[in-house]
């Protein structure tokens, strides 16, 4: 069963500052694919910086998820590249 929430997400993707982005990850989960030997495998990582990128990524995300029986996760809490790269570990 496929669930498509792109319309709902598009309303939330409002970037206020340069460098803001929303992370995307596509996961292959053992709950959905019983033949896997581990619980989770990352198939794809990306980031969306604006609405145009989001619209372009939709078809690619749907295709990857459909072909691999995977799930796409888009974090709606925005991140900022400057904040991430200046973080001291």
Image: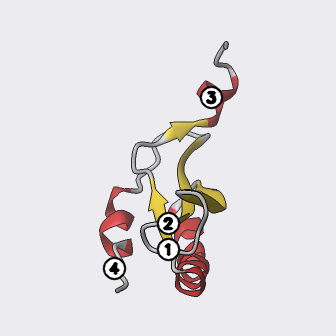
Asked whether the residues under the numbered discs 4 and 1 touch, taking CB atoms below 8 Å apart as contact, a structural biologist would say no
Mark 3 and mark 2 lie on one chain; the one further toward the N terminus is: 2
| Residue topped by disc 2 | 30
Q: CA distance from mark 2 to mark 1?
A: 5 Å
Give how far across and how far down residue 35 sits, in percent.
56, 75
Q: Nearer the viewer, mark 4 or mark 2?
A: 2
| In this view, 12 is above or below 52 | above
Asked whether the residues under the numbered discs 3 and 4 touch, taking CB atoms below 8 Å apart as contact, a structural biologist would say no
Mark 4 and mark 1 lie on one chain; the one further toward the N terminus is: 4
Give how far across and how far down residue 71 sits, in percent.
47, 69
Mark 4 and mark 2 lie on one chain; the one further toward the N terminus is: 4
Q: CA distance from mark 3 to mark 2?
A: 31 Å
Left or right: 39 with respect to 75?
A: right
Q: Nearer the viewer, mark 4 or mark 1?
A: 1
Mark 3 and mark 1 lie on one chain; the one further toward the N terminus is: 1
Q: Helix, strand, or loop for circle 2?
A: loop
Q: Helix, strand, or loop for circle 1?
A: loop
Q: CA distance from mark 4 to mark 1?
A: 20 Å
Query: Which quadrant does the N terminus fall into?
Result: bottom left
Callout 3: few (<14), some (14-19), or many (20+) C-alpha neighbours within 10 Å?
few
Q: CA distance from mark 4 to mark 2?
A: 18 Å
Asked whether the residues under the numbered discs 2 and 1 touch, taking CB atoms below 8 Å apart as contact, a structural biologist would say yes
Q: Helix, strand, or loop for circle 4?
A: loop
Q: CA distance from mark 3 to mark 4?
A: 31 Å
| Residue topped by disc 3 | 84
Q: Which mark is residue 34?
A: 1
The extreme top residue here reads: 88
Asked whether the residues under the numbered discs 3 and 2 touch, taking CB atoms below 8 Å apart as contact, a structural biologist would say no
| In this view, 55 is above or below 86 | below
| Residue topped by disc 4 | 3
Answer with the quarter of the image where residue 83 lies: top right
Give how far across and how far down residue 52 sits, in percent.
56, 69
């Amino acid at each position: 069963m496929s669930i498509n929430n792109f319309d709902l997400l598009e309303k939330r993707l409002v970037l206020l500052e340069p460098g803001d982005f929303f992370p995307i990850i596509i996961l292959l989960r053992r709950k959905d694919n019983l033949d896997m030997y581990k619980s989770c495998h990352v198939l794809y990582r990306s980031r969306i910086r604006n609405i145009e990128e989001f619209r372009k990524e939709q078809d690619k995300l749907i295709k990857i998820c459909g072909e691999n029986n995977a799930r796409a996760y888009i974090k709606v809490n925005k991140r900022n590249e400057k904040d991430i790269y200046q973080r001291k570990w």
